[in-house]
Structures are given as C-alpha cells and as structure tokens.
Amino acid sequence: MRNLCIIFPDQLNPDFSSLLDYDKELDEILMCEFKKDFTNLNHHKKKIVYQLSCMRHFQSDLTERGCRVNYVKLDDSNNHGDFIPELLALKRAKGFEQLIVTEPSSYDELSSVKRWGDQLEVSVDIRKNNLFMCDKEEFETWSMGRKELRLEYFYRTLRKKFNILMENEKPICGTWNFDKNNRKSLNVNSTVPEQYSSFVDDVTLEVIELVNREFNDHFGTTDQFEFAVNRIQALTALEKFMQERLDRFGDYQDAMLSGEPWLFHSHLSMYLNNGLLTPRECIDDAENES
C-alpha cells in the first residue's frame, strides 16, 4: 500500500481532495464508525441513523468504483474506538507510506490530525477541503481589520467572486437581499407540497436496528426515517425542492403553520454538511430554475 486516504464521516463525496489522485492499484481508504462521535452529545436517534447509513452507502459506492476500503463498523469486535489505534493496527497489518487527509471541519479533529505524523511516524498530507467555496485563509484575509464580521458582507464578496446573481458588478434587480419581502403570513388553507421521502433499504434497516440497540438512551425515535442516504437520493431531494418549493421559499421562509414542519424549506443542509451535495451544484440548480 502506498497511500492510505482517510475519509471522515462528513466527507462523503468522491471529489474530496483526499481522493483526487487516488491510485486504485496502490492506495487504500479508511473509514471508521466510532461510538464516541455520537456520545459526545446526546444526538437524536434519527441523526445517528442518517450519518451511519450515509457512511455505509458511500463505502459501497467507493467499492463499486474499484476503490479498496477498510471499513470499521461501530459494532465490530475489533473496533478500537479512535483513529490512532486503528491506524497503528492497519500500519502493522499492511503498512502505508503516507496518510492523505482532507481537513476535518472540526477544530479538535484537525488539531488531532496535525499530531498524527509524530504519533505514527509517517508522513501526513493534509489537504484543503475543496467543497467549501471559500477556504480559511481567504476568510482570514477578508476579515482582517474589520470592526465586525457580518455575514451579509461576506456573502456579497462571494457573490461577486463567483458571479452569482450579478449583473455588471451589481446584484440582479439592484438589491442584495429581499429580507423585507420574506415575512409573509401563510394562509391556513395553503397547499404545501409533499416532503421528500427516501426508500429505506436493507442497509438502513440494519443501521436502525443497531442504533436502537446501541443508543437506546438517546432521545427521539428511529420511526418513519425518510432522509436521503446516498448521493443519488440527495440529488433527487434537491431537484424536488427546486421544482416544488423554491418559488415560494422566499415569501414564507419565516412562516410557521401548525402541523406543517416542512412548509417550503429545502431540508438540504444535512446533505451539504456531509458531502452528499455541494454548495456549487445547489447554486447552479437554483440559477437554472430562476
């Protein structure tokens, strides 16, 4: 084995920087389910089902692409519970010349990764998270000398950089946002589109059983699980939002209606947070719909 590519639970996209030059003949991948990741806080059972099922589906996708994946399940008898002992065991069993890692989104996790080289006596290549539209260095440069870090102004900078809804350096329609128009009341008789609902396959059913067994003291229920757990399903959820909800999302984004938890919201953030969707493709789809 030449390189071992580490995939963290929120990096479930084949275009992540750690996989860009993956060699199917020489390289391998490591993915791990650690119980500590779900017990540091008392996470809702559905969130745990979602994350574990997404990881297992992504592992299957990578394997179908011809990648060699070392996958450690949460209830495996040889699960060491943390990356260092897992990596030491894999190094003894197979050996690897270098670890390739995409920057974790967690500060604590990134701090840990920066110590791996010394702890494991191996080279560690830490690459930028290429699914963000702005990296940390760019944000630090933008924020330097500012009295306040207001999202509105950062948002304008990125719109200019990527030419999103812009016209000759100015926002389309002459204004940066329409917040004042986004506070309409929703009539009790309004028709709300059906929410997206995925097919629960055997992989997810196995995870549901696991979560009910291993996390039975966590709050919430695993009943009526309906979220996307792979990229194809996430893209379907995105398309459904664009076609059925986007045109009224702005008007009613602050509205609340008893018995209607979804209304015209996208419910796509979970797919963006773990890599099933990318910000750029969501923006491109929205521009194509407009």
Image (cartoon, grey):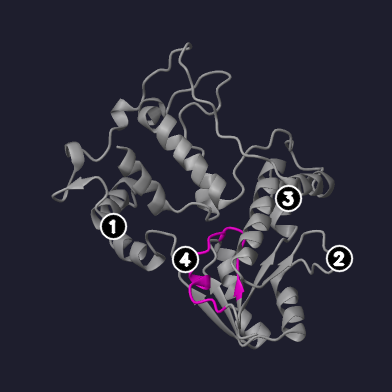
Q: CA distance from mark 2 to mark 1?
A: 52 Å
- Residue 39 position (above or below residue 4): above
Q: Position of residue 289 (x, y in %)?
A: 33, 38
Q: CA distance from mark 2 to mark 4?
A: 32 Å
Residue pictured at 33% horizontal, 48% vertical: 150
- The residue under label 3 is 203
- The residue under label 2 is 77
- Label 4 CA crowd tier, 10 Å (few <14, some 14–19, many 20+): some
Query: Of marks 4 and 1, which one's residue comes earlier in the chain?
Result: 4
- Residue 185 position (above or below residue 174): above
Mark 4 near mark 1, Cβ–Cβ under 8 Å? no
Mark 2 near mark 4, Cβ–Cβ under 8 Å? no
Left or right, 221 with respect to 174, comes to right
Q: Residue furthest top?
A: 189
In reply to whether residue 110 is colored magenta, the answer given is no
- Helix, strand or loop for disc 4: loop
Point out the frontmost of discs 3 and 2. Answer: 3
- Helix, strand or loop for disc 1: loop
Mark 3 near mark 2, Cβ–Cβ under 8 Å? no
Q: Nearer the viewer, residue 215 or 58?
A: 58
Query: Of marks 3 and 1, which one's residue comes earlier in the chain?
Result: 1
Q: State which region is magenta.
A: 5-23
- Label 3 CA crowd tier, 10 Å (few <14, some 14–19, many 20+): some
**Image quadrant in which the N terminus is located:** bottom right
- The residue under label 4 is 129
Query: Of marks 3 and 2, which one's residue comes earlier in the chain?
Result: 2
- The residue under label 1 is 146
Q: CA distance from mark 3 to mark 1?
A: 49 Å
